[in-house]
Image (spheres, rainbow, N blue to C red):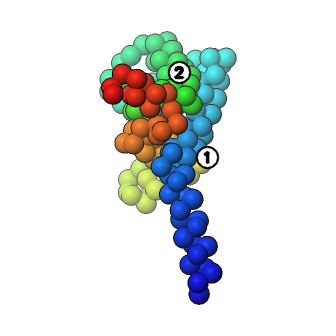
Protein backbone atom coordinates (compact mmCIF):
# COMPACT_ATOMS: atom_id res chain seq x y z
CA UNK A 1 0.00 0.00 0.00
CA UNK A 2 2.95 2.35 0.65
CA UNK A 3 4.40 2.11 -2.89
CA UNK A 4 1.26 3.35 -4.73
CA UNK A 5 0.92 6.24 -2.27
CA UNK A 6 4.56 7.19 -2.76
CA UNK A 7 4.18 7.08 -6.54
CA UNK A 8 1.06 9.22 -6.29
CA UNK A 9 2.76 11.70 -3.96
CA UNK A 10 5.78 12.01 -6.27
CA UNK A 11 3.60 12.44 -9.35
CA UNK A 12 1.43 15.03 -7.57
CA UNK A 13 4.54 16.92 -6.51
CA UNK A 14 5.84 17.03 -10.07
CA UNK A 15 2.46 18.11 -11.42
CA UNK A 16 2.20 20.81 -8.75
CA UNK A 17 5.59 22.14 -9.82
CA UNK A 18 4.60 22.07 -13.50
CA UNK A 19 1.37 23.87 -12.58
CA UNK A 20 3.25 26.60 -10.74
CA UNK A 21 5.10 27.42 -13.94
CA UNK A 22 1.94 27.31 -16.02
CA UNK A 23 2.82 24.28 -18.14
CA UNK A 24 -0.86 23.63 -18.85
CA UNK A 25 -1.30 27.25 -19.94
CA UNK A 26 1.71 26.95 -22.25
CA UNK A 27 0.18 23.91 -23.94
CA UNK A 28 -3.09 25.79 -24.45
CA UNK A 29 -1.23 28.88 -25.72
CA UNK A 30 0.77 26.88 -28.27
CA UNK A 31 -2.25 24.92 -29.50
CA UNK A 32 -4.48 27.98 -29.80
CA UNK A 33 -1.66 29.94 -31.48
CA UNK A 34 -1.34 27.18 -34.06
CA UNK A 35 -5.08 26.96 -34.73
CA UNK A 36 -5.75 30.70 -34.97
CA UNK A 37 -2.49 31.37 -36.83
CA UNK A 38 -3.33 28.72 -39.40
CA UNK A 39 -6.82 30.18 -39.85
CA UNK A 40 -5.47 33.72 -40.19
CA UNK A 41 -2.80 32.76 -42.70
CA UNK A 42 -5.43 30.84 -44.66
CA UNK A 43 -7.57 33.98 -44.81
CA UNK A 44 -4.53 36.07 -45.78
CA UNK A 45 -3.83 33.78 -48.74
CA UNK A 46 -7.48 33.11 -49.64
CA UNK A 47 -10.51 34.87 -51.03
CA UNK A 48 -13.01 36.78 -48.92
CA UNK A 49 -16.07 34.57 -48.44
CA UNK A 50 -17.62 36.63 -45.63
CA UNK A 51 -20.13 38.15 -48.06
CA UNK A 52 -21.97 34.82 -48.05
CA UNK A 53 -22.38 34.71 -44.25
CA UNK A 54 -22.08 38.24 -42.88
CA UNK A 55 -25.85 38.67 -42.58
CA UNK A 56 -25.72 35.84 -40.02
CA UNK A 57 -23.14 37.64 -37.84
CA UNK A 58 -24.39 39.10 -34.57
CA UNK A 59 -24.76 42.87 -34.21
CA UNK A 60 -22.69 45.04 -34.66
CA UNK A 61 -20.50 42.75 -36.78
CA UNK A 62 -23.27 42.20 -39.33
CA UNK A 63 -23.22 45.90 -40.33
CA UNK A 64 -19.45 46.25 -40.74
CA UNK A 65 -18.41 46.21 -44.42
CA UNK A 66 -17.36 42.72 -45.55
CA UNK A 67 -13.85 43.85 -46.52
CA UNK A 68 -13.24 45.30 -43.06
CA UNK A 69 -14.62 42.19 -41.34
CA UNK A 70 -12.29 40.00 -43.41
CA UNK A 71 -9.30 42.23 -42.68
CA UNK A 72 -10.05 42.34 -38.94
CA UNK A 73 -10.61 38.58 -38.68
CA UNK A 74 -7.43 37.84 -40.62
CA UNK A 75 -5.17 40.09 -38.57
CA UNK A 76 -6.76 39.36 -35.21
CA UNK A 77 -6.12 35.67 -35.85
CA UNK A 78 -2.52 36.22 -36.99
CA UNK A 79 -1.55 38.77 -34.33
CA UNK A 80 -3.56 36.95 -31.66
CA UNK A 81 -1.71 33.74 -32.48
CA UNK A 82 1.64 35.52 -32.12
CA UNK A 83 0.52 37.12 -28.86
CA UNK A 84 -0.63 33.80 -27.40
CA UNK A 85 2.54 32.02 -28.48
CA UNK A 86 4.75 34.63 -26.83
CA UNK A 87 2.45 35.16 -23.88
CA UNK A 88 2.21 38.85 -24.79
CA UNK A 89 -1.01 40.71 -23.92
CA UNK A 90 -2.52 37.27 -23.43
CA UNK A 91 -5.74 38.34 -21.73
CA UNK A 92 -6.45 40.90 -24.47
CA UNK A 93 -5.89 38.32 -27.21
CA UNK A 94 -7.87 35.63 -25.41
CA UNK A 95 -10.87 37.97 -25.01
CA UNK A 96 -10.57 39.21 -28.60
CA UNK A 97 -10.41 35.68 -29.99
CA UNK A 98 -13.36 34.59 -27.81
CA UNK A 99 -15.45 37.45 -29.22
CA UNK A 100 -14.33 36.65 -32.76
CA UNK A 101 -15.14 32.97 -32.25
CA UNK A 102 -18.63 33.82 -30.97
CA UNK A 103 -19.16 35.88 -34.13
CA UNK A 104 -17.90 32.94 -36.22
CA UNK A 105 -20.27 30.57 -34.45
CA UNK A 106 -23.19 32.91 -35.12
CA UNK A 107 -22.31 33.40 -38.76
CA UNK A 108 -20.96 30.06 -39.89
CA UNK A 109 -21.28 27.27 -37.32
CA UNK A 110 -24.70 27.73 -35.71
CA UNK A 111 -27.56 25.60 -37.05
CA UNK A 112 -29.50 27.35 -39.80
CA UNK A 113 -32.75 26.44 -38.09
CA UNK A 114 -33.67 24.68 -34.87
CA UNK A 115 -36.91 24.30 -32.92
CA UNK A 116 -35.83 22.37 -29.84
CA UNK A 117 -32.78 21.89 -27.67
CA UNK A 118 -32.45 18.44 -29.22
CA UNK A 119 -32.16 19.96 -32.69
CA UNK A 120 -29.72 22.57 -31.39
CA UNK A 121 -27.63 19.82 -29.78
CA UNK A 122 -27.32 18.13 -33.20
CA UNK A 123 -25.11 21.08 -34.18
CA UNK A 124 -22.55 20.09 -31.54
CA UNK A 125 -20.46 18.23 -34.09
CA UNK A 126 -17.27 18.71 -36.04
CA UNK A 127 -18.74 18.77 -39.55
CA UNK A 128 -22.02 20.29 -40.69
CA UNK A 129 -24.74 18.15 -42.17
CA UNK A 130 -27.57 19.85 -44.09
CA UNK A 131 -27.38 23.15 -42.20
CA UNK A 132 -27.58 21.49 -38.79
CA UNK A 133 -24.49 23.34 -37.58
CA UNK A 134 -20.98 22.46 -36.47
CA UNK A 135 -20.12 24.57 -33.45
CA UNK A 136 -18.22 21.90 -31.50
CA UNK A 137 -14.66 22.97 -32.38
CA UNK A 138 -15.25 26.73 -31.94
CA UNK A 139 -16.95 26.08 -28.60
CA UNK A 140 -13.95 24.01 -27.49
CA UNK A 141 -11.67 26.87 -28.58
CA UNK A 142 -13.64 29.25 -26.35
CA UNK A 143 -13.34 26.80 -23.45
CA UNK A 144 -9.57 26.62 -24.01
CA UNK A 145 -9.22 30.41 -24.18
CA UNK A 146 -11.11 30.97 -20.91
CA UNK A 147 -8.22 29.85 -18.63
CA UNK A 148 -5.92 32.26 -20.49
CA UNK A 149 -8.42 35.07 -20.01
CA UNK A 150 -8.89 34.27 -16.32
CA UNK A 151 -5.33 33.31 -15.31
CA UNK A 152 -3.19 35.02 -17.92
CA UNK A 153 -0.28 33.40 -19.72
CA UNK A 154 1.55 31.99 -16.69
CA UNK A 155 5.09 32.45 -15.42
CA UNK A 156 6.83 31.58 -18.68
CA UNK A 157 5.56 34.50 -20.75
CA UNK A 158 6.41 37.99 -21.87
CA UNK A 159 3.44 39.21 -19.84
CA UNK A 160 5.25 38.05 -16.70
CA UNK A 161 8.50 39.74 -17.80
CA UNK A 162 6.70 43.01 -18.49
CA UNK A 163 4.78 42.83 -15.21
CA UNK A 164 8.02 42.31 -13.24
CA UNK A 165 9.71 45.15 -15.10
CA UNK A 166 6.97 47.76 -15.00
CA UNK A 167 4.62 46.80 -12.18
CA UNK A 168 7.13 45.93 -9.45
Q: Which of the image's four quarters has the C terminus? A: top left
In the rendered view, tell whether residue 115 sits above or below residue 91: below
Q: Of the residues under marks 2 and 1, which one precedes in the sequence?
A: 2
Residue 140: give x, y in percent of width and height.
51, 47
The residue lying toward the viewer, choosing from 29 and 62, is 29
Residue 53: give x, y in percent of width and height.
49, 27
Mark 2 crowd level (few <14, some 14–19, many ≥20, 10 Å Cα): some
Q: Is residue 67 left or right of residue 58?
A: right
Q: Which of the image's four quarters has the N terminus? A: bottom right
Residue 152 seen: yes
Q: Give the residue at x 57% y 31%.
A: 85
Q: Give the residue at x 40% y 23%.
A: 165
The residue lying toward the viewer, choosing from 87 and 118, is 87
Disc 2 versus disc 1: nearer the observer: 2
The residue lying toward the viewer, choosing from 135 and 72, is 72
Residue 111: give x, y in percent of width and height.
47, 44
How many angstroms separate mark 2 from mark 1 (CA)?
Answer: 27 Å
Is there a contact, CB below 8 Å, between mark 2 and mark 1?
A: no
Q: Is residue 47 left or right of residue 51?
A: right
In the rendered view, tell whether residue 122 sits above or below residue 74: below
| Callout 2: SS | helix
| Callout 1: SS | loop
Q: Give the residue at x 53% y 62%.
A: 13
Residue 107 seen: no
The residue lying toward the viewer, choosing from 97 and 128, is 97
Quadrant of the rendered structure where residue 26 is?
top right
Point out which mark residue 79 bears.
2
Q: Which residue is mark 1?
A: 127
Amino acid sequence: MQAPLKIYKNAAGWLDCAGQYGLGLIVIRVLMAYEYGKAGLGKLAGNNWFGNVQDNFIFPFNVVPVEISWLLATWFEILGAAGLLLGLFTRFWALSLIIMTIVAISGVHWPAEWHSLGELWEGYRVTAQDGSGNYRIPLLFIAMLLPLLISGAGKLSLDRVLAKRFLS
